[in-house]
């Protein structure tokens, strides 16, 4: 059978693209090198933060709004809970990147928010013990999305709408030949009109000729059993991010397993190979997260019950890459990571379906164009 579109990689972005193509009655094939739900890429570890006052740049705010609405649509279509609104506290010195950037985005887009002092934050949420010159930007509409369940929902609904799926089948190469694309896997060769490459940490190896300046870094997630669980209840305690002199730490409210998930953004900045990096979590890794965080959140102190590594695929400007390849427009590249892409998955999946079928989309992707790298190289 021939397909209109092939999606390579069925993680966060590929699963969403597969769904949005299948529901438009397109003959679509998704190919994944592992089994969905695997822990080798960037999308495992149950939850991801969704936040609106985007400290990285205010231009992300419309995309977050769209994505939040689409997570609700996906919940309705799949019948499962995928997004929990808990509010967020983004904490640091007033001139920190996190606080100043969050405020700039919140003000520009008139997002509901409130700035409170560290003592006031501790009065509301006694778990926090912060330097007195820190402030917190509180936003009520943030929370977390269920990462693994979100991917499962997209894939299940895609298959129900007619998508074909091959798993445990690594793609070796992707090429455009005239008006067709050819996708070669370890098992066979497929042809289609368009291919979307959503291969996460492996993106560069499938389009080596582009010399994408993306690098892969190792990250660590910990789950701890907090000393005072009553201070971290979901539905009351917010998602939080704290910028201190050692970087940005973040965490989630306690879930039904009685555990808190905590981590450090950019845990490691060293570049790794996604096929051979060290997936064990050391005592030093744990200390990088628990050392600073337990000082600022002593009620969270407690034994580490689980630990996982995960991968960031970083662009030099920490934005995403979403574009058609110049001169080979039938190949669409999607690398929306840089450590903050998951929340956008449904909106990006829809935009990828648009790009694959019509070459354009109503979603503003200008920030994510490939041409910016050519400019910075020149
Ligand atoms: C620790 C951590 C915390 C994060 N926290 C947040 C957060 O709080 N909020 C947020 O919005 N984002 C967050 N992110 C970022 C977010 O998770 C990523 O942006 C997102 O997962 C990227 O999705 P993806 O589809 O590009 O990659 P993936 O989900 O990894 O999917 C890529 C898929 O392609 C497959 N593949 C690769 N090569 C091939 C091949 N040759 N053939 C077939 N299949 C192939 C892989 O197996 C994989 O399944 C975090 C990331 C990490 C690692």
Image (tube, rainbow, N blue to C red):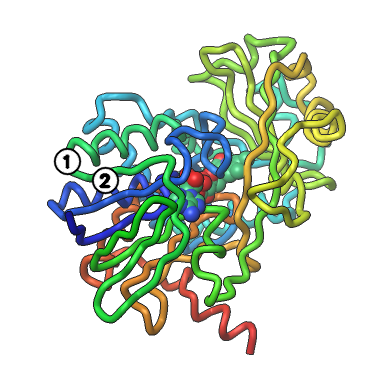
Looking at the rendered image, the quarter that the N terminus falls into is bottom left
Tag 1 near tag 2, CB within 8 Å = yes
Residue nearest the viewer, comparing 340 with 215 = 215
Secondary structure state at the residue bearing disc 2: helix
Residue nearest the viewer, comparing 117 with 73 = 73
> What percent of the width, then of the height, locates residue 130?
79, 32
Q: Residues within 10 Å of mark 2 (few under 14, many from 20)?
A: many
Number of the label disc, if any, that sits on residue 19: 2
Task: Check disc 1 and report the residue beneath it.
Answer: 161
When the figure is inspected, residue 140 is found, relative to residue 338, above or below; the finding is above
Residue drawn 65% across and 67% down?
316
Q: Which sits earlier in the primary sequence, circle 1 or circle 2?
A: 2
> What percent of the width, then of the height, locates residue 29?
27, 51
Residue nearest the viewer, comparing 267 with 59 = 267
When the figure is inspected, residue 303 is found, relative to residue 342, above or below; the finding is above
Residue nearest the viewer, comparing 276 with 136 = 276
State whether residue 12 appears in this view: no
Secondary structure state at the residue bearing disc 1: loop
**Alpha carbon separation for disc pair 1 and 2:** 8 Å
> What percent of the width, then of the height, locates residue 277?
72, 45
């Amino acid at each position: 059978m021939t397909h209109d579109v092939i999606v390579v990689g069925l993680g966060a972005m590929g699963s969403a693209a597969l769904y949005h193509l299948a529901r438009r009655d397109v003959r679509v094939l998704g190919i994944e090198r592992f089994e969905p739900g695997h822990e080798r890429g960037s999308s495992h570890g149950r939850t991801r933060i969704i936040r609106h006052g985007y400290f990285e740049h205010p231009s992300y705010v419309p995309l977050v709004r769209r994505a939040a609405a689409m997570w609700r649509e996906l919940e309705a279509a799949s019948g499962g809970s995928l997004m929990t609104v808990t509010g967020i506290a983004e904490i640091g010195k007033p001139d920190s990147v996190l606080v100043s950037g969050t405020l700039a985005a919140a003000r520009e887009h008139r997002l509901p928010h409130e700035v409170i002092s560290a003592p006031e934050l501790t009065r509301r949420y006694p778990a926090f013990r912060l330097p007195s010159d820190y402030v917190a930007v509180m936003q009520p509409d943030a929370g977390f999305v269920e990462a693994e369940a979100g991917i499962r929902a997209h894939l299940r609904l895609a298959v129900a709408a007619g998508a074909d799926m091959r798993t445990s089948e690594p793609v070796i190469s992707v090429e455009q030949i005239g008006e067709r694309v050819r996708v070669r896997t370890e098992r066979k060769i497929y042809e289609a009109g368009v291919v979307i490459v959503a291969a996460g940490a492996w993106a560069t190896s499938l389009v080596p000729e582009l010399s994408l300046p993306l690098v892969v870094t190792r990250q660590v997630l910990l789950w701890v059993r907090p000393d005072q669980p009553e201070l971290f209840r979901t539905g009351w305690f917010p998602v939080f991010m704290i910028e201190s002199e050692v970087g940005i730490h973040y965490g989630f409210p306690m879930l039904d397993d009685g555990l808190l998930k905590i981590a450090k953004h950019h845990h490691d900045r060293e570049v790794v190979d996604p096929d051979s990096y060290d997936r064990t979590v050391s005592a030093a890794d744990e200390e990088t997260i628990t050392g600073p965080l337990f000082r600022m959140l002593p009620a969270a102190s407690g034994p580490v019950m689980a630990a996982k590594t995960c991968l960031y695929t970083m662009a030099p400007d920490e934005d995403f890459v979403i574009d058609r390849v110049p001169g080979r427009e039938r190949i669409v590249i999607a690398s929306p990571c840089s450590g903050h892409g998951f929340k956008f998955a449904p909106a990006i999946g829809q935009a990828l379906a648009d790009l694959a079928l019509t070459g354009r989309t109503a979603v503003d992707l200008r920030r994510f164009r490939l041409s910016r790298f050519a400019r910075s190289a020149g």
